[in-house]
Amino acid sequence: MSAVPLPASQADVPPAGSWTALRAVFVRDLRVALRRRADTGAALVFFVIVVSLFPLGVGPQLDLLRQMGPGVVWVAALLASMLSMGRLFADDHADGTLEQMLLSPTPLALLVLAKTAAHWLSSGLLLVLISPLLALQFDLGQEAAGVLFVSLLLGTPLLSLFGAIGAALTVGLRGAGVLLSLLVLPLCAPVLIFGAGAVESSIAGLGVAAHFSLLGAMLALALFLAPLAAAAALRISIE
Amino acid sequence: MSAVLECRNLGCMRGRRSLFRGLGLKLLPGQLLRVTGPNGAGKTSLLRMLCGLLAPAEGQILWQGQPLRTVREDFHRQLIYLGHAAALKDDLSPLENLQVSLRLGGQSPDAAAARQALAEAGLHGRESVPSRILSQGQRRRAALARLRLGDAALWVLDEPFNALDTAATAWLLGLVEGQLRRGGAVVLTSHQSVALDASLPQVSLAL
């Protein structure tokens, strides 16, 4: 029986590398996000509504609005990204595709990174793109709005990466959404401080280089470490 | 002949309850292992352990003589596991689902072969509809179509005959027999008594 060469067709079909698997997961998640626009759009609408409530509540006091604008937009972005984060692995867990990812020869951390990237593109990036419009409500100038845009561009991927760790830890748990926020929101405090701080110091006429450098450094570190942590958490959660 | 998969003194705990312990088995190439037992006996847990999804409470699992953890990547390239859930994304078509799962498994499928496999699974004309509208049996067929492609040395199938009609059951039996004849090993659980060609080597394990 062992005389039968088992990998019969492996000679003519080369095994696909990690890159193929990564791209497959990335494209799949983007496709699912595109086909479930209601879910994808919900976080964006939530973000717009929460940010818009503040000028309505505070009234037309421009000085006050200008002062609180960056913080409000950032806090709303934080909450909006938590809203969609819970489903990052929960859906895959429910339909069984998560197990298939765990059984892939491709390192799980890379697959997690691909998933997180797709998730950011379909949620975080939308928040970034709409933020200049929302900045108008707080009478932020062109420069401050630009700084807000860049700070969110650097910061929202961080929120997605931190969120991925929380989502991996809470996958399959009841009440995962609340637990996820409790776990992840404190982790996100530094991102919030430097993100909103960048806009404030730009308004105050100080440089923003330090804030952006710190956000960039955190992003570089998280890009490397968060997928590893999330992958380890997934293996534990799935047992 | 050397075993593809070997368990030594395997034990399983769920919560504080011990489901089984001291389990030893050797699976040879071309051999079928059928795991039977009442609900809650630990069939699924055993299968998940064999795949490396669940760490054994005690004992060791060897893949071609090597501990599973040390050869994970190679092992998973040689493994197809189909669990209770069909592993289909509701919003994607069976064809898209099949291609993703093949790529995740380390293969690079061409669309024609994937279509052919789905047609053989009885999903001709339904390759491109959202999986959401498929029936339970059709979902299972879509998941099983993956067995038709690739040449994994080990199939681990958890209740593969569930929800299948007689035609699909016969088709799946044919696939399993083909895998065994080619020298691949199969582990499956099943409540139904499935009539496999008696000349093929098969062992039963009652938990």
Image (spheres, coloured by chain):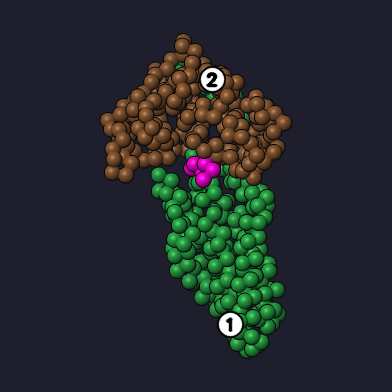
Chain colours: A green, B brown
- Where does residue B138 sit, x and y in percent of width and height? 61, 32
Is-magenta flag for residue A87? no
Identity, as a three-letter code, of the amino acid under mark 1: Met
The nearer-to-camera label among 2 and 1 is 2
Residue B173's disc number: 2
Measured from the top left, where is residue A46 in percent x and y? 61, 67
> Please, is residue A212 above or below residue B77 in the view?
below
Query: Where is residue A138 shown, x and y percent of the image?
Result: 65, 81
The kind of secondary structure element at disc 2 is helix
Q: Chain of mark 2?
A: B
State which chain disc 1 sits on: A
Q: Is residue A98 magenta-colored? A: yes
Extreme residue toward the right, this view = B125
Asked whether the residues under marks 2 and 1 belong to the same chain, the reply is no
Q: Which residues are magenta?
A: A94-102
Q: State whether residue A25 appears in this view.
A: yes
**Residue assigned mark 1:** A68
Q: Residue B149, how many percent across, how many down?
A: 60, 28
Nearer to us in this view, B72 or A237: A237
